[in-house]
């Protein structure tokens, strides 16, 4: 077995000599649009308010970029933050997935608490209840496809090279050593494939009604396991490790337990998501 993917440079699009669209940015935009579209469509299928998904987008974008950069500095390069405090404001100079996850979770939690208080204060009997777990399911359902496109952007620039390999999906010439005749794992590519697999599985499972929190718990459990395994392929001389494990591996373990907790505590909920052909009444989650 030998690697089959040759090295390639990212293709940047030149728009009339005025604007240059870089491949990672293009994939990121596609990922965000597809995530929101899929999440909103699922909300409509589940008799939830798609408008809430659209209002949440701006907070999720803030969480991804601001939280991702904070996580990058705090988890992986704290010495850079100490030596150059202004690096805190260079949002596009390094991102951490788990940093983005943490801030997105905090912002989404804050948003729903505010929305629930606002509706209670309005005193309207016609106000729809907020099924928080239903909306988080919609967000993560759409996120699986968006994450695929985002990671394809990483693959386009090979910014997550792993250890050397002879595996057939290894990419030649991306190793940190600079050797052009050696292949390394491209972890962005692998994670993109895994996320696309999650999306396909979720789409299959969505043919039947599921309890609120099902996709949230399932995503946390599956992503935690897959990310922990992928990080064993990280290049040791580049990525920070604490007691032999990367920050993402510690986060992955926490995600697995969160996923188990959500699935176990929500499985007997009497609030079910709509199927594509069945209408189900809801009660406040």
Image (cartoon, rainbow, N blue to C red):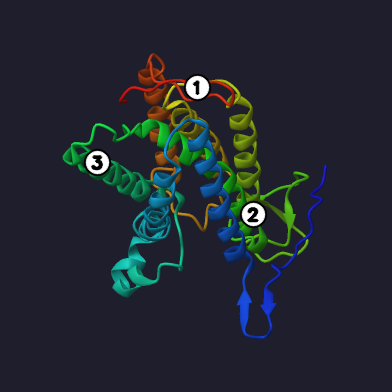
Quadrant (top left, top right, bottom left, bottom right) of the N terminus: top right
Q: Which residue is mark 2?
A: 152
Residue found at x 49% / y 55%: 239
Residue found at x 78% / y 54%: 5
Q: Which residue is mark 1?
A: 279
The earlier-in-sequence mark between 1 and 2 is: 2
Spatial distance from mark 2 to mark 3, Cα to Cα? 34 Å
The earlier-in-sequence mark between 2 and 3 is: 3
The earlier-in-sequence mark between 1 and 3 is: 3
Percent x, y of residue 157? 64, 64
Residue 269, labelled with which disc? none
| Disc 3, SS | helix
Task: Point out the residue furthest to the top here.
Answer: 268
Q: Is residue 247 visible?
A: no
Spatial distance from mark 1 to mark 2, Cα to Cα? 37 Å
Percent x, y of residue 84? 32, 74
Percent x, y of residue 207? 61, 24
| Disc 2, SS | helix
Classify 10 Å Cα crowding around label 3: few (below 14), some (14-19), many (20 and above).
Answer: few
| Front-most of residues 254 and 117 | 117
Q: Which residue is mark 3?
A: 113
Task: Say above or below: 248 vs 83.
Answer: above
| Front-most of residues 141 and 152 | 141
Indicate left or right for 148 with 166 as reference. left
For the residues bearing labels 1 and 2, Cβ distance under 8 angstroms:
no
State the image quarter where residue 150 is shown.
Answer: bottom right
Indicate left or right for 234 with 164 as reference. left
Task: Say above or below: 214 vs 227.
Answer: above
Disc 1 or disc 2, which is closer to the eye? 1
State the image quarter where residue 196 is shown.
Answer: top right
| Disc 1, SS | loop
Classify 10 Å Cα crowding around label 2: few (below 14), some (14-19), many (20 and above).
Answer: many
């Amino acid at each position: 077995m030998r690697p089959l993917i040759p090295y390639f440079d990212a293709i940047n699009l030149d728009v009339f000599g005025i604007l240059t669209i870089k491949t990672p940015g293009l994939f990121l935009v596609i990922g965000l649009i597809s995530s929101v579209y899929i999440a909103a469509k699922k909300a409509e299928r589940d008799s939830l308010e798609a408008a809430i998904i659209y209002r949440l987008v701006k907070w999720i974008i803030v969480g991804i970029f601001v939280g991702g950069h904070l996580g990058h500095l705090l988890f992986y390069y704290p010495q850079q933050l100490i030596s150059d405090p202004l690096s805190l404001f260079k949002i596009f100079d390094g991102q951490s997935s788990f940093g983005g996850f943490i801030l997105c979770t905090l912002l989404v939690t804050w948003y729903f608490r505010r929305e629930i208080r606002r509706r209670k204060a309005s005193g309207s009997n016609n106000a729809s209840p907020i099924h928080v777990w239903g909306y988080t399911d919609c967000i993560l359902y759409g996120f699986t496809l968006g994450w695929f496109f985002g990671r394809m952007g990483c693959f386009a620039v090979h910014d997550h090279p792993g250890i050397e390999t002879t595996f057939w999906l290894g990419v030649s010439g991306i190793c940190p050593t600079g050797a052009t005749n050696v292949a390394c794992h491209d972890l962005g590519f692998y994670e993109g494939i895994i996320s696309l697999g999650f999306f396909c599985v979720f789409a299959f499972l969505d043919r039947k009604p599921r309890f609120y929190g099902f996709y949230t718990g399932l995503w946390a459990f599956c992503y935690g396991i897959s990310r922990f395994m992928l990080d064993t392929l990280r290049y040791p001389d580049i990525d920070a490790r604490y007691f032999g494990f990367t920050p993402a591996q510690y986060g992955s373990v926490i995600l697995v337990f969160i996923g188990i907790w959500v699935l176990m505590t929500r499985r007997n909920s009497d609030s079910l998501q709509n199927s594509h052909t069945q209408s189900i009444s809801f009660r406040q989650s």
